[in-house]
Amino acid sequence: MDERPLADSYGRVIRKVRVSVTDRCNFRCVYCMPSTPLWMPRNRILTFEEITRVVRILTRMGVVKVRLTGGEPLVRKGVEELVRGLSSISGVEQLAMTTNGFFLTEKASALKGAGLMAVTVSLPSLDRKRFERITGVDGLDRVLRGVDAALDEGFDPVKVNATIVRGLNDDEIIALAEYGAEKGIFVRFIEFMPFDSRGLWKPEFLVSWKDMLSKVKERFELMPLPREPGSTSLNYAFKDGGGVGFIASMTAPFCDDCERIRLTADGRLVPCMFGKLEFDMKPLLRGGAGDEELVSFIRTAVEKKERGVKYLLEKGEIPRHVRPMYTLGG
Ligand code: SAM
Ligand code: SF4
C-alpha cells in the first residue's frame, strides 16, 4: 500500500480527521440548525464498519488524531461500539468527541471504557432560559452535569466550547471564563461562522477573538500559551488552572498549517470546511473497492484541498453558507 504521508498541493500534511457520525441532533441551536431539519436518509449514513475502515486507512497515511462529532454524536445508537473499534486502531493516538453534553452523564463511563480519551462539551450559555432559547431545549442542568461526569471519568482534556454571537450571548464571556476557572478547564470561544442553516449570519453578529480576549482580560490575568502547530485555537492560561482559547476562524484563521480533513456522516470527504469541494467515498465503499483504490481516492481529494478561508477573506470574499454546520460537525 502507498503509505506516503497524506499531503495537499500546498505541502500541508494531514494528521487529523473529524468524523461526523450523524447529522441528527436533539438540539436546534440557532447558529447551526434549521428549525425543521431535513435529515439524511438512514441508508446514506456510513455504518460503523465503513467509518472504521476509512479511519484505519487514514491512519496508515499518517492521520493520528480523530474527533467524533455530529450533528450530535451521542444520538447515534451504539456510538460507544464505534469508539471501541476506532480506539483499537493502532495509529490512533488521540480519540476525542465534541458533544452538546445532553446525554453525557449516562454515556461518560461507557465511552471511557470504550477508549474515548478527550471530550469537548458545547455550552453557549449559563443562563437556563437563554440556554433554552439558543438550543431549543431546557437542558442546561443536564449539560453542566455532563461536564462534571466527564471530569469524574477522567477524560483528558475536558474542554468547553461556546460559539459567541453578538446580542445573543456575548455578555456571558466573563461568566463562561469564570466557569472554566472554577472547574480548572479551558473554555474556548468560537467566532460565529456563516454556516448556520437559517441564513442569520451577518458581519455585525461576529465578535472577533480580540474583542473576546479584551473582555476576559477585564477579569483575569492571562498567560499566553505557545500555539501548537495546526491548532485552531489561540490559548491563554489562568494562574490557577484552566484557561481560555479563541477559535478565530473568521478574523485570524490558521490556514497555512491546517492539518485537518473532515468526513461527513454520509461519507463525503471535505478537505476544507470553507471550501466547496467534497468527495463522495460511498460509491467506492459500497461498490467493493479495495484499500488501494480508497488510498488513491483520498490522496486525490486531499491534493485538491483549497488554500483556505484566510485567502478568501483577503480577497474580500466571505464564503457564506457553503454547508450547514450540523452536516459537518464544526
Ligand atoms: N452537537 C455537537 C456540539 O454541539 O458540540 C457537535 C457538533 S456542533 C456542529 C460542533 C460545534 O460547532 C459546537 O461547539 C457549536 O457551537 C459549533 N457551531 C455550530 N454552528 C456554528 C456556527 N455557525 N459558527 C460557529 N460555530 C458553530
Ligand atoms: Fe446540535 Fe451541536 Fe448544532 Fe447545537 S451545535 S444544533 S448541539 S449539532
Image: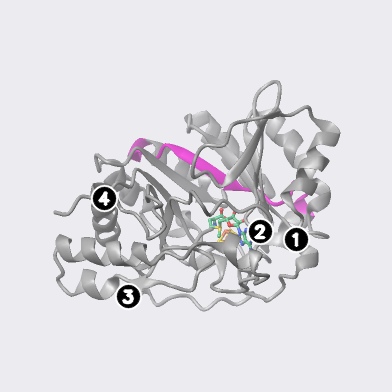
Image-based side of 192 in relation to 283, left or right:
right
CA gap, disc 4 and disc 1? 37 Å
- Residue 275, percent from left and from top: 50, 69
Q: Are marks 4 and 1 in contact (CB under 8 Å)?
A: no
Q: Nearer the viewer, residue 168 or 210?
A: 210
Q: Is residue 102 above or below residue 152?
A: below
- Residue 304: in sight, yes or no? yes
Kindly report the distance in space between the C-alpha atoms of the residues bearing marks 3 and 4: 28 Å
Which one is nearer the viewer's eye here, 256 or 230?
Answer: 256
- Among numbered discs 1 and 3, the one appearing first in the sequence: 3
List the residue tagged with mark 3.
43
Q: Is residue 72 above or below residue 66?
A: below
- Magenta highlight on residue 116: yes
Q: Amino acid at mark 4?
A: Met
Closer mark to the observer between disc 2 and disc 1: 2
- In this view of the protein, can residue 26 be seen by the observer? no
Q: First in sequence, mark 2 or 1: give its number.
A: 1
Q: Tell me which numbered mark, 4 or 1, is placed earlier along the sequence.
A: 4
**Start and end of the magenta stretch?**
113-129
The residue carrying mark 1 is: 206
Query: Can you identify the residue that label 4 sits on?
Result: 61
Helix, strand, or loop for circle 2? loop
Above or below — where is 23 with respect to 246?
below
Residue at which label 2 appears: 250
